[in-house]
Image (spheres, rainbow, N blue to C red):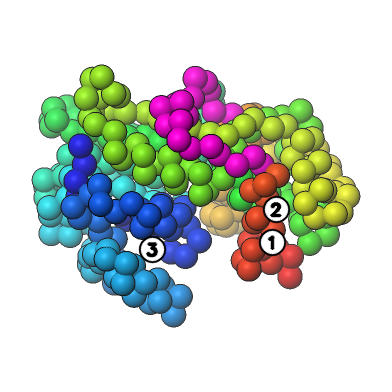
């Protein structure tokens, strides 16, 4: 069982790693050491400074380092959890190598989304660096028999399923969606997913559980786009004008973005293609029943809370 854990990419306010941090605050006694990697080579704004001080006040350790590839930062930890976003995923193999050199033997790669082994996901641009990370872990496992990892798959986080990245224009109550109204996706709230993740950290690495190389599939429900827009209209009190686009035409958007050098647009187009093909529909069986004490919120409850939050104008483009 894990006693000392290091979270990488989890300091950012409002990130999924931040949600996990808040859950760890509620029950830190299970672990002897919980630390957050602080990359001091990156700019630090006032919000980040305040968050670091808050984490310290709550009893967490901050590991300051200017280089993800330095083994010293990972010394003394059983498990490293990566919460790096799209533009940091390429760093994961270097992080894994440095942590292995420091004695770490278990990793949670940044897999908090779809099952990339399903359908056509493995070959999609959006998952390029997640695929490379999995292949790197498999290669290292040939050298290190006791190396382990946990793939924590959730489908999609509800709060971020209705942002502009996926074709939603909440300010004007419009949307352009690749796919059809009957297309499904698996959704769960960020808070509930973080609660489940912390519980997986407490499960023993035994054959009776899931062993040393684990995959958890945990989500909340599989709504269609039609159901999501019905919920959005109840939450916002506005009727959405929705246009459904041919799924495969997202390839053209992706190609154009690649030519222009707009990586964010390229990733968004790739993600729309995945979504339109139901690539974020999490295959069952799910592992929710392993943790019956958690009762996840439904989509409407989650979106009502999200749209009523202070960050709603920024996250949902309402300004």
Q: Which residue reaches farthest bottom?
A: 46
Q: Would you name the residue on which mark 1 appears?
A: 308
- Marks 1 and 3, how far apart in space? 23 Å
Asked whether 48 falls inside the magenta stretch, the response is no
145 or 51, nearer to the observer: 51
Q: Percent position (x, y) of residue 129?
A: 40, 43
Pinpoint residue 148: horizontal percent, then vertical percent. Answer: 22, 33
On residue 304, the disc is 2
Q: Name the residue under label 3.
A: 11
Does 317 sit left or right of 23 as displayed? Answer: right
**Which residue is at a point 56% across and 55% down the rendered structure image?**
264
- Identify the residue at horizontal 29%, vertical 33% (top origin): 203
Q: Is the magenta stretch mostly helix, strand or loop?
A: loop
Q: Which of marks 2 and 3 is nearer the N terminus?
A: 3
Quadrant holding the C terminus: bottom right
Q: Is mark 1 on a helix, strand or loop?
A: loop
x and y percentages locating residue 117 in the rendered image: 45, 26
Q: Seen in the image, is 7 located left or right of residue 123?
A: left
User: Foreground mark, 1 or 3?
Assistant: 1
- Is residue 248 something that shows in the picture? no
Closer to us: 308 or 185:
308
- The residue range painted magenta reads 281-299
Q: Which of marks 2 and 3 is in front?
A: 2
The residue shown at (52%, 30%) is 121
Seen from the viewer's position, the closer of residues 235 and 109 is: 235
Separation of marks 2 and 3 at Cα, in angstroms? 25 Å
| Contact check, label 1 and label 3, Cβ < 8 Å | no
């Amino acid at each position: 069982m894990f006693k000392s854990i290091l979270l990488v990419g989890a300091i950012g306010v409002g990130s999924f790693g931040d949600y996990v941090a808040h859950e760890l605050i509620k029950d830190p006694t299970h672990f002897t050491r919980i630390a957050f990697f602080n990359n001091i080579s990156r700019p630090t704004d006032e919000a980040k400074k305040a968050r670091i001080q808050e984490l310290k006040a709550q009893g967490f350790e901050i590991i300051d380092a200017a280089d993800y590839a330095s083994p010293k930062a990972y010394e003394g930890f059983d498990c490293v959890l990566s919460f790096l976003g799209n533009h940091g995923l390429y760093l994961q193999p270097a992080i894994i190598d440095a942590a292995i050199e420091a004695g770490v033997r278990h990793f949670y790669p940044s897999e908090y989304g779809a099952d990339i082994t399903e359908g056509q996901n493995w070959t999609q641009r959006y998952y390029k660096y997640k695929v490379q990370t999995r292949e790197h872990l498999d290669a290292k496992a040939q050298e290190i028999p006791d190396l382990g990892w946990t793939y924590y798959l959730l489908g999609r986080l509800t709060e971020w399923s209705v942002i502009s990245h996926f074709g939603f224009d909440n300010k004007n109550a419009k949307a352009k969606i690749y796919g059809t109204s009957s297309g499904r996706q698996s959704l769960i709230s960020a808070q509930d997913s973080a609660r489940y993740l912390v519980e997986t950290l407490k499960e023993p690495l035994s054959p009776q559980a899931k062993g040393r190389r684990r995959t958890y599939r945990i989500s909340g429900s599989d709504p269609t786009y039609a159901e999501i827009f019905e919920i959005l209209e109840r939450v916002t009190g506005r009727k959405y004008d929705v246009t459904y686009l041919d799924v495969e035409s997202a390839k053209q958007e992706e190609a154009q973005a690649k030519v222009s050098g707009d990586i964010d647009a390229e990733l968004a187009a790739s993600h729309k293609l995945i979504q339109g093909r139901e690539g974020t529909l999490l295959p069952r069986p799910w592992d929710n029943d392993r943790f019956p004490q958690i009762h996840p919120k439904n989509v409407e409850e989650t979106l009502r809370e999200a749209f009523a939050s202070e960050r709603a104008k920024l996250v949902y483009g309402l300004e």
